[in-house]
Amino acid sequence: MKIEDTPQPICQPEIKFDYPSWLRYQDLSHGIVRVDETIRELSSNRILGEINQIKRQQRPEMTLIISSPGGGAYYAFAIYDALRVLSKSGTKIKAIVEGWAASAASMIILQAADIRLSHASARFLLHECRRWVFFAIERTTDLKDEVKEMDAITSRILDILSKRCGKTKSEVRKK
């Protein structure tokens, strides 16, 4: 029986590539930090720790390699702020997008870099602030509070994007 004759599954499961920790350590020793997964609590803690290590090393430059579907805005803002502090302390931050920078990875983290580059086949996704709710029962006042918070997040993202591209917030919001 040849491989071609073997029935293939209709839907191939996605296999997550987990970048080995020893390679992360080696990258870090060369001033490279990777944002290569969904931005949430554990990944943002790792990224923040690596940024702090770069700061302690007082490196003149750092390379941020991004290939991420995005994630939580609050975690991304923490990474953005840490990168801006690092930049203001004298470290030149270069970001390179490999594959994709979606959502919080492109709207927030990528914007913290002093130099932003991407490969020709890289893709970007920017979208309006979203929230995910599973089996929630909420009161009207809860929803009003959520809308206020989402508007605040959107406003902060628009501030960051408008500053980086030299356009007004309303121009950025249009497209």
Image (cartoon, helix red, strand yellow):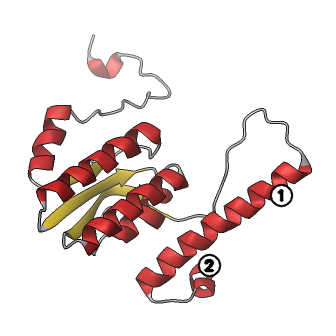
Quadrant containing the N terminus in the rendered view: top left
> Helix, strand or loop at disc 2?
helix
Picture coordinates of residue 150, whole percent (x, y) = 68, 61
Picture coordinates of residue 136, whole percent (x, y) = 79, 36
Q: Which residue is mark 1?
A: 144
Mark 2 to mark 1 CA distance (whole Å): 22 Å
Q: Is residue 123 visible to us here?
A: no
In this view, 89 is above or below 56? below
- In front here: 98 or 56? 56
Picture coordinates of residue 148, whole percent (x, y) = 75, 63
Left/right placement of residue 88 relative to residue 57 reads right
Q: Nearer the viewer, mark 2 or mark 1?
A: 1
Q: Residues within 10 Å of mark 2 (few under 14, many from 20)?
A: some
Among numbered discs 2 and 1, the one appearing first in the sequence: 1
Which amino acid, by three-letter code, is at mark 2?
A: Arg
Q: What residue lies at 53% left-to-right and 54% top-to-bottom?
A: 74
The image quadrant that residue 78 belongs to is bottom left
Which amino acid, by three-letter code, is at mark 1?
A: Lys
Label placed on residue 173: 2
Q: What residue lies at 34% left-to-right and 18% top-to-bottom?
A: 5
Label tally: 2
Q: Residues within 10 Å of mark 1 (few under 14, many from 20)?
A: few
